[in-house]
């Protein structure tokens, strides 16, 4: 059985191919065309795994670009896919936090890995990867570097939740000579606090997993763990969780 | 679903023609915004009660030159239609009746006075209190004398009882149609159900409307026999009022493969169990008792809404509940917490959405709705 799971996100398109127990992964920027991105991604996955397109049993697509992709066998929401993947990786998890490029989600799952409740951020970028990306630009860093640059012993509180206002706020702080490392810690705290509030609304049951691209950032991990007062389980290749879940759904169907 | 709803879709147009003719002949028209307005009183005064526009995004930009942006879209749309004179029903109204349901509406009505005479009824919010009912009875008597004065008519008890029977019958007919959706598969999609229940409030011919409703009920009941179809998730919609023009959540649920089988909202099932007691001596008390029972979130406490929701979840064999709050509607927004608890206690998936009339959030609504439907086994 050979299945492909694609997660066409707002920033990156992630793909997983499951080839008789072996897992291959690939990621490319989504760019402006989710359709082209998914096509390119499938080619890349086939090349890595050394398989032919005709051999594919199924393609399952998730992510905001899910409907733009033609020829997909099935579509599923990211919520279902993250739940499916985490149930496979960590059966003991009851609550999942997923922070991606344009939204953050909290998902409650039962013992069978079924979604029983979820919450998503409102129509605003606060508490998402986009928020961190805009702030990284203002600080002259790449978003991937933020985590290693924080000084968590010197957290500068960032009060604005709104991405636009928070950017002005940190530009003001920088102008006053405030420590950059402290500001970065403050940004992570801001995301952590925002997402933790959403977690408390949905509730914690069992252990908590943290998935999505933002889970790679050690600063956000630290902040969220402090806010929730618990250890987070983070899958290796956390940004592929949705794509893995999609592939697993295809394998089961 | 091959039922012909064209008669219902053309109610607004047909009604408008009739209203214009009636106006030319000297009949009065009274515009109504809310389920709390006792239409019986207007009918008994020999005037035409008609719903006013407030379910479209179009006039909101114009309304925002006067009203704050962060306000419920229903209030902004209602005011915008009035201010831009784009609602023909408002245009033809001699008088508009409002109620102090929520803060936004009552303050908006003060501003609307500059455009058209608006008569505002003081609606008490403490629902299970004798003093509240007493005040409401007094308010209905005040409405009666105001209408008599403004429209230069006499509202007799006899006329009131007649109007009460008309509205009771109409309510029963709409309920009979809505109840057909308890079957599997349901006879009407959510969009069709909305077309029927929302459009009826624009009708200016009660007799014809009743005939149409009863005819539709019989047609639907007959067409139901022996139908088989793939089972779709049955969704109950609750929360803020929805009409044609603001039906995006119904549309999205049905596009995603679900079916809205019932709507616990103002133009839907919220008022359908309520009948005026025709055994009483005083028609005003009969009306007051009925209207006080409407389970709007402006009531505190609001136990009937929870009873009704619980019963609807069972009787309509619901698989999931969507609770829609329009932006800045505090009472429905806060009450959503308790609605969520009730639904989850029943073991059903629950989705609370906060939105407005714009299409800016269609994608984010869609993902939530799809995820809700995925939760249905």
Image: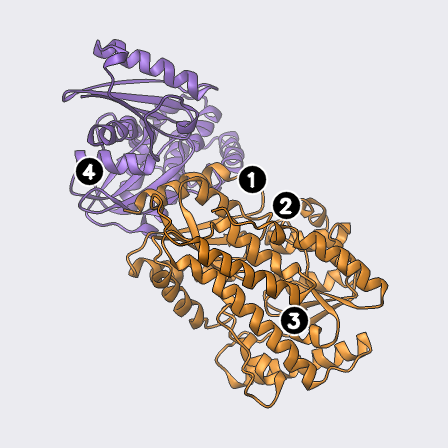
Chain colours: A purple, B orange
Distance from Cα at disc 1 to Cα at disc 2? 9 Å
Chain on which label 2 sits: B
Residue at the farthest left position: A21
Q: Quadrant of the C terminus of chain A?
A: top left
Q: CA distance from mark 3 to mark 4?
A: 56 Å
Question: Which quadrant of the figure has residue B162?
Answer: bottom right
**Which residue is disc 1 drawn over?**
B359
Q: Residues within 10 Å of mark 4 (few under 14, many from 20)?
A: many
User: Mark 1 touching mark 2, by CB under 8 A?
Assistant: yes
Question: Disc number at residue B39?
Answer: 3
Residue at image x 25%, y 49%?
A204
Spatial CA distance of label 2 from label 4 is 43 Å
Q: Tag 2, which secondary structure?
A: loop
Q: Quadrant of residue A130?
A: top left
Q: Position of residue B159 (x, y in %)?
A: 69, 81
* Residue A153 appears in the figure: no
Mark 2 neighbour class, 10 Å CA radius: few under 14, some 14 to 19, many 20 or more: many
Q: Nearer the viewer, mark 3 or mark 4?
A: 3
Please tell me how crowded label 1 is: few (under 14), some (14-19), or many (20+) other residues with Cα within 10 Å.
few
Instruction: Specify the label residue B86 is tagged with.
Output: none
Q: Is residue B215 visible?
A: yes
Circle 3: element type:
helix
Q: Secondary structure at mark 1?
A: loop
| Residue designated by label 4 | A87
Q: In percent of the image, x 33 and y 34: which residue is there?
A: A76
Residues tagged by mark 2 and mark 4 found on one chain of the structure = no
**Sequence order check: which comes first, mark 1 or mark 2?**
2
């Amino acid at each position: 059985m050979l299945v492909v799971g694609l997660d066409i996100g707002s920033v990156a398109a992630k793909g997983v191919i499951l080839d008789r127990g072996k897992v291959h992964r690939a990621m490319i920027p989504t760019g402006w065309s989710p359709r082209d991105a998914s096509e390119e991604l499938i080619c890349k996955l086939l090349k890595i795994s050394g398989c032919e397109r005709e051999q594919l049993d199924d393609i399952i697509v998730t992510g905001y670009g899910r409907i733009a992709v033609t020829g997909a066998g099935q579509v599923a929401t990211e919520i279902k896919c993250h739940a499916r993947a985490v149930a496979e990786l960590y059966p003991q998890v009851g609550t999942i936090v997923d922070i991606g490029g344009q939204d953050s989600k909290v998902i409650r799952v039962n013992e069978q890995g079924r979604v029983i409740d979820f919450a998503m951020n409102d129509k605003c970028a606060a508490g998402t990867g986009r928020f961190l990306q805009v702030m990284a630009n203002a600080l002259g860093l790449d978003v991937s570097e933020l985590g290693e640059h924080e000084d968590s012993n010197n957290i500068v509180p960032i009060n604005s939740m709104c991405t636009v206002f928070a950017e002005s706020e940190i530009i003001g702080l920088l102008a006053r000579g405030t420590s950059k490392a402290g500001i970065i810690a403050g940004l992570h705290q801001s995301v952590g606090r925002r997402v933790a509030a959403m977690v408390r609304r949905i509730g914690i049951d069992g252990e908590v997993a943290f998935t999505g691209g933002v889970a790679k950032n050690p600063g956000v991990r630290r902040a969220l763990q402090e806010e929730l007062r618990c250890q987070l389980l983070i899958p290796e290749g956390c940004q592929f969780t949705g794509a893995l879940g999609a592939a697993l759904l295809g394998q089961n169907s | 679903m091959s039922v012909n709803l064209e008669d219902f879709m053309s109610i607004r147009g047909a009604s408008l023609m009739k209203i214009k003719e009636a106006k030319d002949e000297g009949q009065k028209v009274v515009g109504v915004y809310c389920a709390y307005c006792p239409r019986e009183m207007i009918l008994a005064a020999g005037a035409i009660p008609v719903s006013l526009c407030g379910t479209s995004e179009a006039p909101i930009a114009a309304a925002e030159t006067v009203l704050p942006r962060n306000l419920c879209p229903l209030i902004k749309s209602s005011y915008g239609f009035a201010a831009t004179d784009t609602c023909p029903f408002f245009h033809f109204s001699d008088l508009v009746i409002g109620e102090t349901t929520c803060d936004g509406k009552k303050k908006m009505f003060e501003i609307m006075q500059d455009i058209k005479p608006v008569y505002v009824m003081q609606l008490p919010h403490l629902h299970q209190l004798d003093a509240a009912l007493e005040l409401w009875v007094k308010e209905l008597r005040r409405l009666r004398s105001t209408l008599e004065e403004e429209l230069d008519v006499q509202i007799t008890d006899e006329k009131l009882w007649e109007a009460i029977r008309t509205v009771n019958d109409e309510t029963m007919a709409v309920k009979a149609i809505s109840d057909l959706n308890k079957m599997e598969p349901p006879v009407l999609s959510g969009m069709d159900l909305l077309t029927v229940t929302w459009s009826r409030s624009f009708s200016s011919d009660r007799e014809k409307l009743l005939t149409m409703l009863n005819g539709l009920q019989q047609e639907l009941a007959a067409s139901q026999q022996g139908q088989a179809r793939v089972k779709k998730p049955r969704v109950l919609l609750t929360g803020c009022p929805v009409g044609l023009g603001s039906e995006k959540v119904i549309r999205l649920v049905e596009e995603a493969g679900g079916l809205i089988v019932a709507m616990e909202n103002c133009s839907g099932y919220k008022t359908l169990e309520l009948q005026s007691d025709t055994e009483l001596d005083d028609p005003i008390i009969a009306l007051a008792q009925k209207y006080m029972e409407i389970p709007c979130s402006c009531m505190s406490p609001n136990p009937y809404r929870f009873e009704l929701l619980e019963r609807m979840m069972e009787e309509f064999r619901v698989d999931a509940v969507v609770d829609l709050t329009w932006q800045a509607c505090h009472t429905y927004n806060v009450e959503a917490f308790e609605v969520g608890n009730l639904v989850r206690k029943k073991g059903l998936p629950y989705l609370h959405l906060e939105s407005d009339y714009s299409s800016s959030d269609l994608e984010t609504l869609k993902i939530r709705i799809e995820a809700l439907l995925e939760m249905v086994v």
